[in-house]
Structures are given as C-alpha cells and as structure tokens.
Amino acid sequence: MVGRPHLVIAVDGPAASGKGTLARRLAAYYGLSYLDTGSLYRATGLAVAAAGAAPDDEAAAVKAAQTLDPSRYSEDQLRSPGAGEAASQVAAIPAVRSALLEFQRGFATTPPGAVLDGRDIGTIVCPDADAKLFVTAQPETRAQRRHLEHAGRGDALSYEDVLADIRRRDERDSGRAVAPLKPAQDAILLDTTELGIEAAFQTALDLVESDLNERGQSA
Ligand code: CDP
C-alpha cells in the first residue's frame, strides 16, 4: 500500500472475538504498527498481583498503571486466564484508564500509523480513527476458541469455566461506567461466529477498505 497517508485503524470487541488476530493481520497488510491494548491492562493486573494487592485496590492499580513496564511479563503470563480476569477488574477503574490513555494515543499518532485493538479504541482512544471495526461472535464460539488457546498453553481450564469467564468479563466490560465495551456509532460490525481466520480477514479487509473509501482515505 505505497503512498498511504498516516492511517489509524481501531478494532474493538469482546474477549476471543478474533479481534487480535484480525488487527495483527491488518497491521501487516497496511504496513502499520500494532498495539494490543488489552496487554496493557493485563500487565497492570499482573503488576498489582506482584505487589501483593487485590485487583480492585484502586491505589495499587493506579500506581501499577503509572509505572507500567509491559515487557516485564512473558506472553504466556499475559495471556493466562488469571491475567484476563485481573485486567478486566483494573480496567474498570477510571484512573487506571487515564494513566494508560496517553501511551495509547501516542502510539497511534506515531508514524507510520497503527492498528490498535481493545474495547474503547473507536470510542475513546482514537475517536478520529480512519476505519473502525467492531468484531463480535457468539459467546459459545468465543469460549471454544479461547479454550483451545488455553489448552495450547497448558492451562487446564474446562470449556464451561472459560465460557463463564467470558460471560463475566463481557458483563463487567459492557456495564462499567467509564469506556464501556460498545461499538462506536461509526464502527462497522463484523460477526466472526461462522468465519474461519482467513475468511474473517478477507471480510475485515473489504470492510476496512470500504470504510477508508467512504472517509476519503483510500490509496
Ligand atoms: O483477548 P481478550 O479479548 O480476552 O482480552 P484483552 O483484549 O487482552 O483484554 C483483557 C481485559 O482488558 C478486557 O476484559 C477488558 O476489561 C480490558 N480492556 C479494556 O478495558 N480496554 C481495552 N482497550 C483493552 C482491554
């Protein structure tokens, strides 16, 4: 995509909807940087636990977010079920969100532009993004995908436990007062329930291209 101007693409959606895989592939396709914003919240949750505090301990969570070094944690630590649950708890604290906001916005505005995935990219972090996708899938399908992922990492959680975790986090993420999980008004919805990775990516690409065309950003 030679000659593209600075592009920012927002990819939001609930747990295990496929947004991370899509966002990563979109970034590679357009030659943009990629930020998994969930990993910032996951690292904050892990840092709070490392400090011996509970994830709903506001002072500890804010301090962890303000002094965050996500590179301290391995991918396996960040993607563990415990980190996801802790992330969802610290993410409901408004001051934690503000502490992480500047880094995310700075990342988006740094050349050559970026694809960010999360829950509030299209609504709060990058409301002026050039394209916005909101990726969903049925909870049972998401639980199957996440269950396989955990099994691949050696986390022995049952499918039922994973589904319960996903429902609990969906509810907390959608119900919180600050930056709740919801599609931006101008986001394009993509349901990946019936789509494999390749089909989901082709559909996402078509949707992003038409969004960019509509906003006058096409190559
Ligand atoms: O991969 P998965 O969707 O399970 O989780 P994630 O994207 O890594 O996010 C973990 C948790 O961080 C979510 O349940 C949200 O509570 C929180 N989060 C958020 O509040 N805002 C974001 N932009 C990204 C994640």
Image (cartoon, helix red, strand yellow):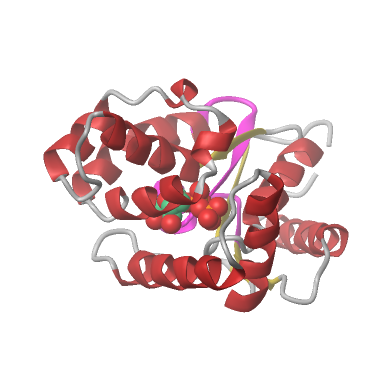
At 33% from the left and 59% from the top, the residue drawn is 179
Q: Quadrant of residue 72?
A: top left
**Residue 208 on the magenta span:** no
Left or right for 96, reference 27: left
**Residue 131 on the magenta span:** yes
Instruction: Specify the segment rendered in magenta.
Output: 109-133
- Whole-percent x, y for residue 45 in the image: 34, 41
Q: Is residue 124 visible in this depiction of the protein? A: no
- Whole-percent x, y for residue 27 in the image: 71, 39
The front one of 108 and 173 is 173
Left or right for 164, reference 57: right
At 64% from the left and 27% from the top, the residue drawn is 112
- Indicate the quadrant containing the N terminus: top left, top right, bottom left or bottom right: top right
- Indicate the quadrant containing the C terminus: top left, top right, bottom left or bottom right: top right
At 37% from the left and 70% from the top, the residue drawn is 174
Vertical placement of 66 versus 166: above or below? Answer: above
At 54% from the left and 28% from the top, the residue drawn is 74
- Whole-percent x, y for residue 67 in the image: 28, 23
The front one of 148 and 180 is 148
